[in-house]
Image (tube, rainbow, N blue to C red):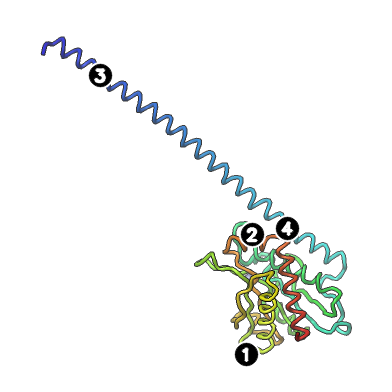
């Protein structure tokens, strides 16, 4: 091969390498641009979901609480409905947790808020019945466990109902309402099973079961007591429902129905 031919070949190869380099750079820039765009879209979607979860959903729960809280104060019956003499039964209603004890939390769902919203709604529904309803708290304050159960004992309640929300991190598909009663308490068992049976019959709320539970307030209750785990915040669907005013109202209606039927022994 002559020197001239060699030079031409080298020149051609150099040109080809340059062309390939340019192509690689061009495609890389395009790929980076597409990836950047995709990332921006994902971040935007995440941002929107975050705002929706934390601002709107939380506001719904707060609004519901503010509404029911205001209602309780306007009517001037903060803690008690009827006097002992007027009422046939005494029900002590306990909205679990409160104040700096939020209970179980997931996303914008906070257990103490849901418990309080349902308790206030139940109190409202029970007005007009011959039942003295006493709340352990009607605002977002911390009340000790002993204080709660001693109130029920002191008032010699016919029934002490404590409202809570459940959480099960091992299986997020688990959902439904559960009742716990003190072991060796025939009356507690009766009310716990009554609530579950009524809900199973009416089918507005999905119940799981009633069983003995080893909770402080149950161990120390000298009156019939039931701790209601209204649903699982670890379950996406149930969490959304527990946060909605509509479902909280449904829960209140079903719990009140079960309690009334329990009192009446029907
Ligand atoms: Zn709880």
Are dots 2 and 3 in contact, CB under 8 Å?
A: no
Can you give x and y, in whole percent of width and height, for residue 22 in the image? Answer: 35, 23
Q: CA distance from mark 3 to mark 1?
A: 92 Å
Q: Nearer the viewer, mark 2 or mark 4?
A: 2
Q: CA distance from mark 1 to mark 4?
A: 39 Å
User: Which mark identifies residue 227?
Assistant: none
| Of 217 and 199, the residue lying toward us | 199
| Quadrant that contains the C terminus | bottom right
Does label 4 point to a residue whose CB lies under 8 Å from ligand 1? no
Which secondary structure, mark 3? helix
Which secondary structure, mark 1? loop
Question: Circle 4 is placed at which residue position?
Answer: 62
Q: Nearer the viewer, mark 2 or mark 1?
A: 2
Residue count near mark 1 (Cα–Cα under 10 Å), binned few <14, some 14–19, many ≥20: few
Query: Residue 47's image quarter?
Result: top right
Query: Residue 87's image quarter?
Result: bottom right
Lower sequence index among marks 3 and 4: 3
Q: CA distance from mark 3 to mark 4?
A: 71 Å
Q: Residue at x 79, y 82 (%)?
A: 90
Can you give x and y, in whole percent of width and height, for residue 148 in the image? Answer: 71, 77
Seen as rendered, the residue at the extreme left is 1
Question: Circle 3 is placed at which residue position?
Answer: 14
Q: Is residue 14 above or below residue 210?
A: above
Q: Nearer the viewer, mark 2 or mark 3?
A: 2
Are dots 3 and 1 in contact, CB under 8 Å?
A: no
């Amino acid at each position: 091969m002559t020197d001239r031919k060699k030079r031409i070949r080298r020149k051609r190869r150099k040109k080809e390498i340059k062309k390939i380099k340019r192509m690689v750079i061009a495609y890389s820039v395009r790929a980076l641009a597409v990836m950047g765009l995709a990332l921006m879209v994902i971040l935007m979607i995440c941002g929107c979901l975050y705002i929706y979860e934390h601002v709107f959903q939380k506001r719904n729960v707060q609004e519901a609480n503010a509404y029911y809280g205001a209602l309780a104060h306007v009517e001037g019956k903060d803690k008690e409905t009827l006097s002992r003499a007027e009422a046939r039964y005494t029900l002590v209603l306990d909205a679990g947790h409160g104040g700096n004890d939020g209970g179980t939390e997931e996303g914008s769902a906070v257990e103490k808020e849901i418990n309080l919203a349902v308790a206030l709604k139940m109190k409202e529904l029970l007005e007009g019945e011959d039942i003295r309803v006493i709340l352990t708290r009607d605002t977002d304050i911390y009340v000790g466990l002993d204080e709660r159960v001693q109130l029920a004992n002191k008032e010699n309640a016919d029934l002490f109902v404590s409202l809570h929300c459940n959480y099960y991190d091992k299986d997020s598909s688990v959902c439904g309402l559960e009742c716990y009663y003190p072991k060796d308490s025939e009356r507690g068992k009766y009310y716990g099973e009554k609530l579950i049976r009524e809900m199973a019959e009416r089918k507005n709320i999905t119940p799981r079961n009633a069983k003995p539970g080893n909770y402080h307030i149950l161990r120390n209750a000298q009156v019939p007591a039931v701790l209601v785990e209204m649903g699982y915040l670890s379950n996406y669907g149930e969490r959304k429902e527990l946060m909605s005013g509509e479902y909280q109202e449904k829960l209140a209606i079903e719990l009140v129905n079960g309690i009334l039927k329990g009192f009446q022994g029907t």
